[in-house]
Amino acid sequence: LAVREALYGERHRNVAQICKNIGDTLAAIGDCNSALLHLQRCLSITEVLLGPKHPKTAAAYHNLGRVCRMSGDITAALEHHQKAQAILESELGPSHPDTQKACACVAQILHEQGKFVEALALYQKGRECREMTMGTNHPGIASTYSNIGRVYQAQGDLESALQHFQMALTVEQASMGP
């Protein structure tokens, strides 16, 4: 990192990438606090270089959210993932695959927090967008049906959960074979 900073300066895309790589590695070995410091620095550099509404800025927020979630800070994770989602929705549109992944991250956290109605709304929105862009037999649709089923299961609505798990299986079989 010090070599890159000396070579390029403290606010260069290569320095941001090294900070991200260090943050990812620290998170992988369980040092989330140090990881967050490096990922925050990556975000700061990315915002300066590309602006607050760039998809790479959204990716930096996503990385922060992922590590916050690993560390157990679900509130901060949700904030970061929602920022990523908002940027991607604004810049790439609601149907873009990156936007859909961001929505799924937010929905998963809402599910973990017991905010089932909000999680279901995001999953349903994602399913509709995915069906429009990928068709009804794409493996991503099966994943979404499974996520919806898990939310219904957590709510105790086992009939709806089973229905969605069966729909996921049907899509999986249609897209990949039995």
Image (tube, rainbow, N blue to C red):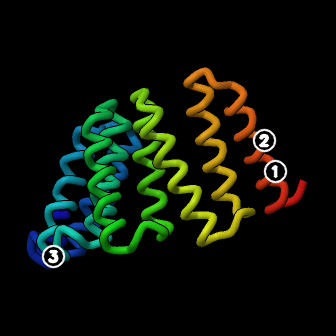
Kindly identify the amino acid type of the residue bearing the numbered disc 2. Gln
Q: Residues within 10 Å of mark 3 (few under 14, many from 20)?
A: some
Residue 173 percent location from the top left of the image: 84, 55
Q: Are marks 2 and 3 in contact (CB under 8 Å)?
A: no
Label 2 to label 3: alpha-carbon separation: 47 Å
Residue 137 percent location from the top left of the image: 74, 63
Taking the image as shown, residue 9 lies to the left or right of residue 59, namely left
Point out the frontmost of discs 2 and 3. Answer: 2
Q: Place residue 46 in its image quadrant.
A: bottom left
Taking the image as shown, residue 7 lies to the left or right of residue 173, namely left
Q: Helix or strand or loop: what does disc 1 sit on?
A: helix
Depth order, front residue of 2/153 = 153
Mark toward the start of the polypeptide (3 vs 1):
3
Kindly identify the amino acid type of the residue bearing the numbered disc 1. Thr
Q: Are marks 3 and 1 in contact (CB under 8 Å)?
A: no
Mark toward the start of the polypeptide (2 vs 3):
3
**Where is mark 3, residue-wise?**
49
Kindly identify the amino acid type of the residue bearing the numbered disc 3. Leu
What residue is at 65 percent from the left and 46 percent from the top? Answer: 145
**Where is mark 1, residue-wise?**
170
Q: Are marks 2 and 1 in contact (CB under 8 Å)?
A: yes
Q: Residues within 10 Å of mark 2 (few under 14, many from 20)?
A: some
The residue furthest top is: 156
Label 3 to label 1: alpha-carbon separation: 46 Å
Depth order, front residue of 112/1 = 112
Q: Helix or strand or loop: what does disc 3 sit on?
A: helix
Question: In the image, is residue 83 above or below residue 146?
Answer: below
What residue is at 43 percent from the left and 66 percent from the top? Answer: 94
**Where is mark 2, residue-wise?**
166
What residue is at 19 percent from the left and 76 percent from the top? Answer: 50
